[in-house]
Amino acid sequence: MRVGVLALQGAFIEHELYYKNLGHEVFEIRQLADLSLFSLTNHYPPTTNNSLLILPGGESTVQVKLLKDLGLYEPLKAMIAAGLPTIGTCAGLILLANHFQLLPVTVKRNAYGRQLGSFTYVGTFDGKANVPMTFIRAPAIESISKGVEVLSEFEGKATAVRYKNITAFCWHPELNS
């Protein structure tokens, strides 16, 4: 699988290492030209069978400003809307819901406290028990629309969701096995 990781700001290195350790081809998306690497056949949109886009944690307002300044915002939004499998963690969740408006959930930024209030919770994810979930200044999913599947919860609130080709997390799966 070809994994493109948005590498403008935030925790992109951890995602890169995670997918490289799984044996996938990983590359960074830093500029518009990097999007052409996404497709095995060099056509737009990329083949969805072999590609995965990662929108990492970080600072969502900085990421969206850089996406727009670099001309990446509209092409990435179009690729995701066209069905490109996409994972968003923390700030990536905020980008998908609040900025791209492709994930029909309501998100509250920094809902789980400050950086020093980070914690790990062991719960159930997508039917699998005992999954560690690391929350770092995480957003909260306040509400979900019809068609959104809840994959994990903490204290009665959804913390990971799936909608069509998008999977999004309040927590950081790349930090845990």
Image (cartoon, rainbow, N blue to C red):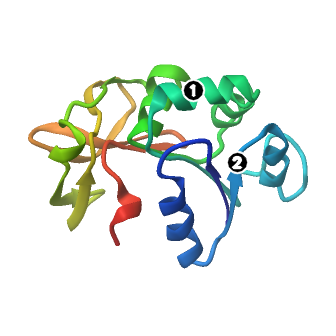
Q: Give the residue at mark 1.
A: 64
**Which residue sits at x=71%, y=29%?**
78
**In-front residue for pair 158/22:** 22
**Alpha carbon of mark 1 to alpha carbon of mark 2: how far?**
14 Å
Report whether 105 appears left or right of 33: left
Q: Give the residue at mark 2.
A: 29
Q: Which of the 4 image quarters holds residue 161?
A: top left
Q: Which of the 4 image quarters holds residue 93?
A: top left
Q: Is residue 129 visible?
A: no
**Which residue sits at x=65%, y=44%?**
84
Q: Quadrant of the C terminus?
A: bottom left
Other residues around mark 2 within 10 Å, as few (<14) / some (14–19) / many (≥20): many
* Residue 22, above or below 6: below
Can you give x and y, in whole percent of width and height, for residue 1 in the image? Answer: 67, 66
Q: Secondary structure at mark 1?
A: helix
Q: Is residue 130 visible?
A: yes
Numbered circle sitting on residue 153: none
- The amino acid at mark 2 is Ile
Looking at the image, the residue that sits furthest to the left is 155
Other residues around mark 1 within 10 Å, as few (<14) / some (14–19) / many (≥20): many
**In-front residue for pair 115/20:** 115
**Which residue sits at x=53%, y=69%?**
17
Report whether 16 appears left or right of 150: right
Looking at the image, the residue that sits furthest to the front is 116
Can you give x and y, in whole percent of width and height, for residue 86 in the image? Answer: 56, 46
* Residue 110, above or below 161: above
- The amino acid at mark 1 is Val
Can you give x and y, in whole percent of width and height, for residue 146 in the image? Answer: 35, 25
Q: Earlier in the sequence, mark 1 or mark 2?
A: 2
**Which residue sits at x=71%, y=24%?**
69
